[in-house]
Amino acid sequence: MNFFEKNGIDKDKYRVLCGNLLDGGEFASTVLDRTYDLVLMNIVADVIIMMLPLLKEHIKGTVVCSGIIIERLDQVKDALVANGFAISDIKEKNGWAVVCANR
């Protein structure tokens, strides 16, 4: 049972995508053909920073960025703000951070 099933969320209410947005291929075209209420990114800071300009017009709600080492947190926060996001929450634990931001 996955997260959505455990929480009673119908399959028509979410879409899970996995691929390389930065390569500009078919996956990127699929992702960038719509807008999203929620985007979760659990990847290193460099990739988050590179993806934000591509995604900023496609996120109409919240982006959650995790997998960020504390030393790179300020850079991710700066990139979020520079791309039009307002930071709503930051959590830190054991040298890692997660940042939530909204459009």
Image (spheres, rainbow, N blue to C red):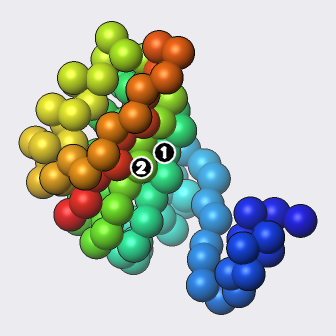
Residue at image coords 22%, 24%: 75
Q: Residues within 10 Å of mark 2 (few under 14, many from 20)?
A: some
Q: Is residue 66 above or below residue 15?
A: above
**Disc 2 and disc 1: Cα gap in Å?**
6 Å
Residue at image coords 61%, 60%: 17
Q: Quadrant of residue 58?
A: bottom left
User: Is residue 23 visible in the rendered structure shown here?
Assistant: no
Q: Quadrant of the C terminus?
A: bottom left
Drawn side of residue 82 relative to residue 5, left or right: left
Q: Amino acid at mark 1?
A: Met
Q: Quadrant of residue 71?
A: top left
Drawn side of residue 98 relative to residue 103, left or right: right
Q: Which residue is mark 1?
A: 41
Drawn side of residue 96 relative to residue 3, left or right: left
Q: Position of residue 77 (x, y in %)?
A: 22, 34
Q: Position of residue 79 (x, y in %)?
A: 19, 36
Give the SS element for disc 1.
strand
2 and 1 marks in contact (CB < 8 Å): yes
Q: Amino acid at mark 2?
A: Val
Q: Position of residue 73 (x, y in %)?
A: 30, 23
Residue at image coords 42%, 26%: 92
Q: Position of residue 55 (x, y in %)?
A: 32, 56
Give the SS element for disc 2.
strand
Q: Which residue is mark 2?
A: 64
Q: Which mark is residue 87?
A: none
